[in-house]
Amino acid sequence: MPTDASIRFFDAQFRRQVVEHDYRLNPFEAAALPHLRGRVLDYGCGLGNLALAAARGGCEVVALDASPAAIEHLREAARQESLAIDAQECDLRTYVLREQFDCVVCIGLLMFFDCEAALAQLRSLQDHVRPGGVAVVNVLVEGTTYHAMFDPSGYCLFAPQQLEERFAGWNISACAQDNFPAPGNTMKCFSTVIARKPE
């Protein structure tokens, strides 16, 4: 059983979604989908809804997550459809990437690490996008007041423009700030960047 509070939170959520057959792409995944091509890394894939959609569209996908429930579901779904998805359960705070990708997607993950780990993994993700490839990154930012899913011992709310600043020198095709109401009259505030690495 996962020991990290954030992993436990999402593992339980993913188990509920499987029972309810709730496999819809969230708005950030839907925005990412048109940019996916070639070899794709889905870093923090959750249930793998985006990974499955990408593989159905002809992409070869490496999908990583710390949730046992999510990876078990994704492996079975990929097996049933004979899709090119390599799904791995791992601790993404310290995961070492060893190959380059045409597209790297990291949606709703980095803020669950302490800030040092979050920024280190963001740099690694950027380093492992091939020249001309695309990164799609989404994080929670300051102003977020819904904290139930965080491990109190360590998380990182980015400054509102921090993610965009981290892609200086890239060709940014989309940059958005989105707010969504959350339980208990709280708010989730997101920043999303879609950027192409210079050739």
Image (cartoon, rainbow, N blue to C red):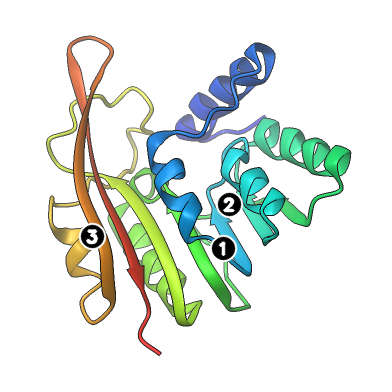
Report if the CB atoms under discs 3 and 1 are less than 8 Å apart.
no
Q: Residues within 10 Å of mark 3 (few under 14, many from 20)?
A: many
When asked about the image quadrant of residue 134, the answer is: bottom left
Question: What's the residue at 20%, 76% (across, down)?
Answer: 168
Q: Is residue 131 placed above or below 115 in the rendered structure?
A: below
Q: Which residue is mark 3?
A: 163
Task: Find the distance from the CA under tag 2 to the CA under tag 3.
Answer: 22 Å
Three-letter amino acid code of the residue under disc 2:
Asp
Dot 2: element = loop
Please name whichever residue, 139 or 198, is drawn nearer the observer in this view of the structure. 198
Residue under the image location 58 percent in, 62 percent down: 41
Please name the residue shown 31% across and 47% down the image.
Answer: 139
SS for dot 1: loop
Decide: marks 2, 1 in contact (CB < 8 A)? yes
Quarter of the image with the C terminus is: bottom left
Residue type pointed to by label 3: Leu
User: What is the number of the mark on residue 91?
Assistant: 2
Q: Which residue is situated farthest in the bottom direction here?
A: 199
x and y, in percent, of residue 136 in the image: 40, 59
* Spatial separation of the CA atoms under disc 3 and disc 1: 20 Å
Lateral position of residue 84 relative to residue 184, left or right: right
Residue 102 percent coordinates (x, y): 55, 73
Q: Is residue 108 visible?
A: no
Q: Which residue is mark 1?
A: 95
Q: For mark 1, does the 10 Å Cα neighbourhood hold few (<14), some (14 to 19), or many (20 or more) residues?
A: few
Residue in the image at 41% along x and 73% along y:
126
Q: Give the image location of residue 74, x and y in percent.
A: 72, 39
